[in-house]
Each structure stands twice: as structure tokens, then as C-alpha cells.
């Protein structure tokens, strides 16, 4: 399986990231929010779940997650 990401910036605003996720086709099955303050990752994960009903995970610093 391959992915082609469109324009993506590590400096996008919260609103831009939420909008970008909404534009993805096909919709992702799971989104992992990382890179930033834990509270902001939780907030982003929550908004993404509420708007798009996609499973989200916001792991804590040094937490291990299994990718399948």
C-alpha cells in the first residue's frame, strides 16, 4: 500500500490540520497525533474524532504503540 501526501507543512495551524485531514481520500482508519504538547495532541485527536469519526490516538511521551 502506498500513500501520496499533498502539501503538508509542519507549521500548519490547528484549523489547517483539521481541514487537511478532512480532505484525505480514502479516509484514514486511524490517526496518531504526535509532535507537540501532549494537551494539544489530545485536543487535536478529540476534534478529529468528533468531526470525522475516525479512531485517534495521542500517545504520551515515550509511550510505545504498535502499528499493524
Image: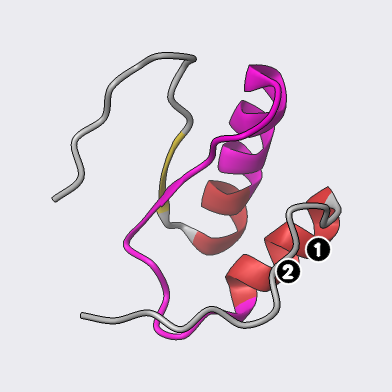
Q: Which mark is residue 53?
A: none
Question: Which residue does the image show at 62% across and 80% down from the upper left?
Answer: 23
Residue that mark 2 sits on: 19
Task: Give the magenta range.
Answer: 23-47
Query: Crowding near pointer 2: few (<14 within 10 Å), some, many (20+)?
Result: few
For the residue pair 60 and 30, the one nearer the viewer reads as: 60
Question: Which residue does the image show at 61% across and 72% down from the upper left?
Answer: 22
x, y percentage for residue 7? 70, 79
Answer above or below: position of 61 versus 22.
above
Q: How is the image coloured?
A: secondary structure
**Residue contact at pointers 1 and 2, CB within 8 angstroms:** yes
For the residue pair 62 and 27, the one nearer the viewer reads as: 62
Residue that mark 1 sits on: 16
Magenta stretch: residue 24 in it? yes
Answer above or below: position of 4 versus 64.
below
Query: Crowding near pointer 1: few (<14 within 10 Å), some, many (20+)?
Result: few
Residue 54 quadrant: bottom left
x, y percentage for residue 61? 49, 14
Question: Would residue 13 be found to the left or right of residue 65 on screen?
Answer: right
Question: Would residue 28 be found to the left or right of residue 48 on screen?
Answer: left
Residue 18 quadrant: bottom right
Amino acid at each position: 500500500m502506498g500513500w501520496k501526501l499533498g502539501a503538508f507543512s509542519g507549521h500548519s495551524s490547528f484549523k489547517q490540520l483539521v481541514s487537511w485531514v478532512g480532505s484525505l481520500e480514502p479516509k484514514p482508519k486511524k490517526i496518531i497525533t504526535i509532535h507537540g504538547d501532549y494537551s494539544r495532541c489530545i485536543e487535536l485527536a478529540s476534534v478529529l474524532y468528533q468531526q470525522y469519526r475516525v479512531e485517534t490516538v495521542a500517545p504520551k511521551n515515550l509511550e510505545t504503540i504498535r502499528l499493524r
